[in-house]
Amino acid sequence: MGLFDQWCDEVTHDIGAHSIVVLRTDEQREAVGLQAIAEAIPVQYVSTRRYARILKLLGKNGAAAYLRDQLPQTQASRSGDLGEVLALTFVEERTAWGHTVKKLRWKDHRDMPMRGDDLLAIRIDGDEVALLKGEAKSRRQMSSHVLKEAEEALRANDGRPSPHALAFYADRLDEEGHGELADAILAMQYGDGIPTNRVSHMLFSFSGNDPESLLRGLLENYEGQFEQAYVGLCVENHRRFVHDVFEKIGSDGDA
């Protein structure tokens, strides 16, 4: 069972060639989601291999302290990170995009956002490479203005992933032993270029208010040429939920 299946109800709508997925939960099931997410987050900041070495070196208390030092401390940075983590998890669990990178492991500072596209994923279709470019927004009260910012970010670089993000992604894939995939990305980027029909977009919204009408309105007015997938996760107690997720990670590490 995937992370979202444990605590969310799902509704999917097709709008032309595009789609909207809305995930909703209630207060009674939030505890289930909180526990599942708290268990899934640490690997976003440090690989299991690295954490095992730190655990052996420093012991349980030292390893727990190391992990806490990687996690964001401000509410804004926690909210942003959690939005990206949830978006990445959705892509990994619920879509055919087979290769992703847990980019938060390379943050310059735990309370500073990373530059570049929020999310990239790759899929090999026969001999061709396809790319997913994603943006994640997390707000206590989502607005059309914030979602429009995400759409504009998706349109940037002529709708393609930024060169910086692609190079970063290829380097991380190579380090993780996926050299052929990394080479395929660079060959497409620096060869004939990235065809528009090999790029899709995802907009992920995480908020306390129901985002369905906002996402639908944005998508119904979309006139671009890229396939769009909009995903909205609604957790009514958004602010408290974000706080409790990261606090639970810290308390679980101390247990």
Image (cartoon, rainbow, N blue to C red):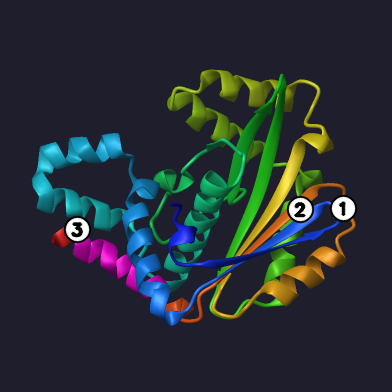
Q: Quadrant of the C terminus?
A: bottom left
Q: Relative to 115, is 241 on the left or the right?
A: left
| Residue 251 is one of the magenta-drawn residues | yes
Q: Are marks 1 and 2 in contact (CB under 8 Å)?
A: yes
Residue that carries the numbered disc 1 in the rendered image: 224
Return the x and y of residue 229 as percentages of the image width and height.
Answer: 71, 54
Circle 3: residue type = Gly
- The picture places residue 173, in percent across and down from the top left corner, at 50, 29
**Discs 2/3, front:** 2
Q: CA distance from mark 2 to mark 3?
A: 39 Å
Q: Residue at x 68, y 77 (%)?
A: 143
Q: Is residue 65 left or right of residue 239?
A: left
Label 1 packing within 10 angstroms: few (<14), some (14-19), many (20+): few
What x and y, as percent, mark residue 91? 57, 48
Q: Which residues are magenta?
A: 242-253
**Residue 253's mark?**
3
Question: Which of the 4 image quadrants contains residue 247?
Answer: bottom left
